[in-house]
Image (spheres, rainbow, N blue to C red):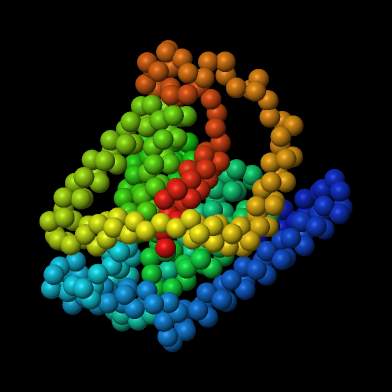
Amino acid sequence: MLFRTLYQYLSAPLSIKASKISRFIFLVVASLSLFWFVYFCFAAIHIPYPIEYREGASQVMTQILLTGGNPFSLEHHPLSMNNYGIGYNLVVFPFAKPFGNTLIVHRSVSVFFLFASLFLIASVVWKLKQDLLVSIISCIFITIGLAGRGGLGAFPSALGAFLFLSAILIPSLYSFRFSSLVCSAVLAIMAYYTKPYFVIAFGIVAIYTFTFVSKRKGFFYCLFFLFTFGLLFLGVRYVLKLYFIDTFISNLSNTKQSLDHLYDQLLELGIEFSPAILVGLVLLLFNLPSFSLSKFHKNILSWAGILRADTPLLNIHINYFAFAFIFCFSAFVLVLCPHK
């Protein structure tokens, strides 16, 4: 099916011959990038030594689980103390049991979720654009970015990123249906227990749904999330005594902020992602002529709209992905980025 779609795509008539050639070149380069990425992933899996200090911490927690111990008990502290949570190790556990508590097993799980993110992003872009080339380039670019920023090792980054992306993108894929919101809430909770700050997905979906989709759906989403999160919180607090001390209190106590560190991180990321930033600015400029205040509804906030539960809080259309980007970037700058 994929090869037939690819053949139809490449053989489809185009109005300009140069456009067809350029798109073919882009496709070839993107495919080579994907093949190199696959090779790099499998090469990284088999590196016989830790590629980052956190890899050993993951193996320690997994080993305690394999022996039937509780990694968040006084018995195993401070050796098993982990700021991230237990989600990644629970996913690794059924594979480490038969194949061993090795770096290869841990990294293989991470690579699997990198490719899961790749296919998720490709599906979303395909639904938006119906363009195979754009889908391929987008998913490769973003997934390589995830891998380069710490997603290849034996730690929860790749799994957390997949859960985070899924919690945000699934409601959009399924038009914010109630079932997709339930799925998103569960994924956001799973993301929290994998890497705590990925729970920001809940804030993105909750605020956007309530404000721009439907107050009823937004309220339902918040209520379902808080109820499920509360029940699970009580269970975790009872079974894993030190869990929230390790993953919440310890992170909360890390209050040292530095504007110099904020500047250094923004500069580093700005340079690394400058091609994407440049392309984004160009696309923004091209779309400015189509922007008009007359397209907005006259009554952005009306009493009739407020009283109706099935209407959004604001009678205005805001692009979901732009909203998610602004939300995440604001959280990054104001909360995460200044912390060393």
Residue lying furthest top: 304
The residue shown at (62%, 71%) is: 35
Q: Which image quarter holds the C terminus? A: bottom left
Q: Is residue 162 above or below residue 98?
A: above
State whether residue 169 appears in this view: no
Residue 262 point in image, percent of width and height: 50, 57
Q: Is residue 213 above or below residue 236?
A: above
Quadrant position of residue 23: bottom right
Q: Answer left or right for 152 relative to 272.
A: left
The residue shown at (32%, 48%) is: 186
Q: Answer left or right for 44 relative to 216.
A: right
Q: Nearer the viewer, residue 153 or 301?
A: 301
The residue shown at (41%, 50%) is: 335
Q: Is residue 189 above or below residue 241?
A: above
Q: Is residue 106 above or below residue 184?
A: below
Residue 47 point in image, percent of width and height: 47, 84
Q: Nearer the viewer, residue 309 or 182?
A: 309
